[in-house]
Image (cartoon, rainbow, N blue to C red):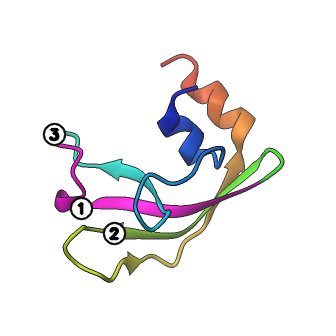
């Protein structure tokens, strides 16, 4: 399993200095300076929850949080990734 997949599934620490996990970054430069969609990730057994989703940059101290939480099965997530 790649380190990025382990992070989004809550099996590895976040990749950002504040412990958050980057879910989507600029596909051209992968730089937080362009902004990224990030989240806090927690895991309970097979259930993964992304909470405090937000838009984050490295030049603004505040994160624009969305009022949204996403919960899903890690096994189902991996099954969907497998064909790719």
Q: Residue 42 location in percent, x, y?
A: 68, 59
- Residue that numbered label 3 is attached to: 28
Q: Is residue 82 left or right of residue 61?
A: right
The reply to whether discs 1 and 3 touch (Cβ–Cβ < 8 Å) is no
- Residue that numbered label 1 is attached to: 35
Judged from the image, the secondary structure of the residue bearing numbered disc 2 is strand
Disc 1 residue crowd, few under 14, some 14–19, many 20+, Cα 10 Å: some
Q: Residue at (18%, 60%) from the top-left corner?
A: 33
For marks 2 and 1 on the same chain, the one whose residue lies earlier in the sequence: 1
Judged from the image, the secondary structure of the residue bearing numbered disc 1 is loop
Disc 3 residue crowd, few under 14, some 14–19, many 20+, Cα 10 Å: few
Tag of residue 67: none
Which quadrant: the N terminus? top right
Tag of residue 55: 2
Q: Is residue 82 above or below residue 58?
A: above
The reply to whether discs 2 and 1 touch (Cβ–Cβ < 8 Å) is yes
Q: Is residue 83 above or below residue 78?
A: above
Query: How far, Cα to Cα, is label 2 from label 1?
Result: 7 Å
Q: Residue at (29%, 81%) from the top-left corner?
A: 61
Query: How far, Cα to Cα, is label 2 from label 3?
Result: 17 Å
Query: How far, Cα to Cα, is label 1 from label 3?
Result: 12 Å
For marks 2 and 3 on the same chain, the one whose residue lies earlier in the sequence: 3
Within the magenta stretch, is there residue 51?
A: no
Judged from the image, the secondary structure of the residue bearing numbered disc 3 is loop
The single residue placed furthest to the top in the displayed view is 83
For marks 1 and 3 on the same chain, the one whose residue lies earlier in the sequence: 3
Q: Residue 77 location in percent, x, y?
A: 64, 36
Image: magenta residue range: 28-43
The single residue placed furthest to the bottom in the displayed view is 62
């Amino acid at each position: 399993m790649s380190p990025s997949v382990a992070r989004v599934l809550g099996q590895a620490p976040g990749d950002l200095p504040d412990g958050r996990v980057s879910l989507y970054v600029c596909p051209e430069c992968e730089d937080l300076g362009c902004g990224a969609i990030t989240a806090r990730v927690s895991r309970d057994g097979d259930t993964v929850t992304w909470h405090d989703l937000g838009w984050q940059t490295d030049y603004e101290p505040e994160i624009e949080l969305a009022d949204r939480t996403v919960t899903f099965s890690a096994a189902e997530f991996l099954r969907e990734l497998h064909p790719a």
